[in-house]
Amino acid sequence: MPLSSFRVFSAFYRPFVRATHSTSTMATTGKQKAALLHGRTYTYIPPTIRASDTDKIPLLYLAYRPIVISGPSGTGKSTLLKRLFAEYPDTFGFSISETTRSPRPGEQDGREYNFVTKEGFLDLVAKNGFIEHAQFGGNYYGTSVQAVKNIAEKKRICILDIEMEGVKQVKRTDLNARFLFLAPPSLEVLEQRLRGRGTETEESLQKRLDQAQNELEYAKLPAAHDKIVVNDDLEKAYVELRDWVVDGGKFGAQ
Ligand SMILES: Nc1ncnc2c1ncn2[C@@H]1O[C@H](COP(=O)(O)OP(=O)(O)OP(=O)(O)O)[C@@H](O)[C@H]1O
């Protein structure tokens, strides 16, 4: 795993989940629609519980619907989310990751991380309890479905900044999330932004661009996302993203 992926799990009180790796598996139910795009098969996974099944969704998740923001690395997700959190400081929640590593001095269980045993972690993996998980430096790290639910319980809206496999995994839960895809104006512009950011090696840049193609192709599937925003002009993209997220003050509540 490239070092840059570690920041996914390293920040305290993360307002959103950042991940570039996932070990989620593809579902194989008959409900799926598959589409062959450019020689690869992409599967649209319909939500386990549809937003229209309001009687099956716990009340809290009707009111505090998590928002999943995905899009190729370098599209501008962090830039736009930072602005959103600054404009709405008390609206969004903090998801706490699970980890099998030991607490460092000063760290508290349930604050920086939920510290769990390897057995407990793998048991939750087997039960499909993670949205994303990864191994780093001999330890496991992950974002559990329960951690996202805890945010709704605090009456806040959880924003998940995750990649495609995580998006599919969220669709398999009863989180009743809304899905926004942030697209770059083009792959060329994306490459320029990644180079301009100065965080990538040539190798990690290539990996990100390859993954960007996968994400862009998945996003073409009908109903993969509820909203697509193209981040061409930053100001325009921010207003479009914010207006969709805020939804006239309802934040997507049903
Ligand atoms: N509309 C825009 N016009 C020009 N530059 C932009 C625009 N949006 C973002 N950028 C720049 O592009 C770079 C990548 O943005 P950012 O780091 O927010 O992407 P990201 O999607 O969060 O990437 P990652 O998933 O790798 O963290 C940054 O240097 C940012 O300043």
Image (spheres, rainbow, N blue to C red):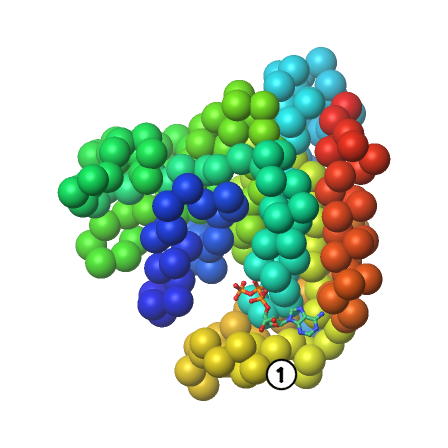
Q: Residue furthest bottom?
A: 202
Comparing 34 with 134, the one in front is 134
- Please, what secondary structure does the residue beneath circle 1 have? helix
Name the side, left or right, on which 38 lies relative to 112. Answer: right
The residue where tag 1 is placed is: 192
Comparing 119 with 80, the one in front is 80
> How far from the left and from the top, in percent, is residue 107?
24, 39
Looking at the rendering, which quadrant does residue 104 occupy? top left
Comparing 18 with 175, the one in front is 18
Indicate whether 66 appears above or below 69.
above
Q: Residue at x 33, y 34 (%)?
A: 111
Comparing 119 with 153, the one in front is 153
Amino acid marked by disc 1: Gln
Q: Quadrant of the N terminus?
A: bottom left
Q: Residue at x 52, y 46 (%)?
A: 16
Looking at the rendering, which quadrant does residue 128 occupy? top left
Q: Residue at x 57, y 59 (%)?
A: 78
Indicate whether 195 appears above or below 146.
below
> How far from the left and from the top, in percent, is residue 81?
62, 53
Q: Is residue 228 something one can see in this rendering?
A: no
Q: Quadrant of ligand 1?
A: bottom right
Q: Is residue 232 something one can see in this rendering?
A: yes
Name the side, left or right, on which 113 lies relative to 131. Answer: left
> How far from the left and from the top, in percent, is residue 144?
43, 36
Looking at the rendering, which quadrant does residue 138 occupy? bottom left
